[in-house]
Image (spheres, helix red, strand yellow):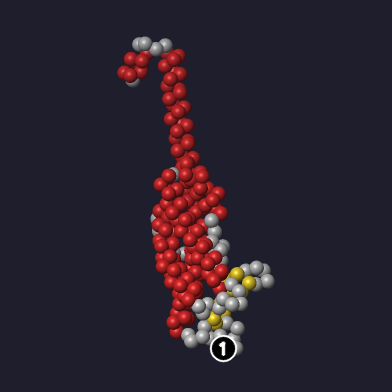
Amino acid sequence: MRFIANMQSFLPITALVAIILFAVKEIVEYVKKTRGNHRKIQAIKEILSEELERNLWTYKIMERTVKESMEILENCRNPAFGIRRTATGEIRFWRKYDENEELEGSGHPLPEVKQDKYESVVLELAQLDSGLFNSARIAYDSLKELGHIRKSLIETLDGPENDGKGGIWEGFLTYARRELKDIYDAMNELYTLMKGQPLDKPRLR
């Protein structure tokens, strides 16, 4: 109050009121903007968390594919591997423990890596929270690597002559196993930052 009284001694009351109203308005706008930004950040965290959960399913499929293939190569005499495409265009990994068996073999789908949600919010995230943006950038760079591993697996086995018997297939599996651990670590770090818990439950859709 003494400050206001001192202000009144050299400012007209109308000017003083105008200054106070301006200050109050700026404070209110700042609070509203801060709350609005907080809500936007929380929404982005939820969007990215769900996308990471979907990509965790892809990660687990790739991890399983690499692990099973290495075990088959080690324990089976004449295994065969390949890529099959369904009538709907779905890409499936296929393996046979012995190529001489009459059984057709078995396999599973190879789901694609999802990044469209991140791409839709990345610019806004960079403006709202630089720290979260940097963590997200690292995690999604790792997802690009996961996509590259999936693509390389398909290219290595696609076609009638690529049956997974050569050194290229074994070399790919060794490379993929090494990279997959780092990919999960980056995904999990971002997810834990956003949700406060580890990334361990995949979302199928």
Position in image of residue 82 (x %, y %):
57, 76
Position in image of residue 99 (x %, y %):
56, 85
Locate residue 14 relative to residue 81 in the image: left or right. left
| Residue 195 seen in this snapshot | no
- Name the residue rendered at 62%, 69% in the picture: 90
Q: Is residue 24 positioned above or below 151 on the image? A: above
- Name the residue rendered at 44%, 15% in the picture: 15
Between residue 130 and residue 54, name the one nearer to us. Answer: 130
- Name the residue rendered at 56%, 73% in the picture: 157
Q: Quadrant of residue 175?
A: bottom left
Between residue 32 and residue 60, name the one nearer to us. Answer: 60
Q: Quadrant of the N terminus?
A: top left
Q: What amino acid type should be assigned to the residue bearing mark 1? A: Asn
User: Are there few (<14), some (14-19), or many (20+) residues within 10 Å of tag 1?
Assistant: few
The residue that label 1 is drawn on is 100
Q: Is residue 155 positioned above or below 33 on the image? A: below
| Residue 112 seen in this snapshot | yes
- Name the residue rendered at 47%, 56% in the picture: 141
Between residue 13 and residue 199, name the one nearer to us. Answer: 199
Position in image of residue 41 (x %, y %):
47, 46
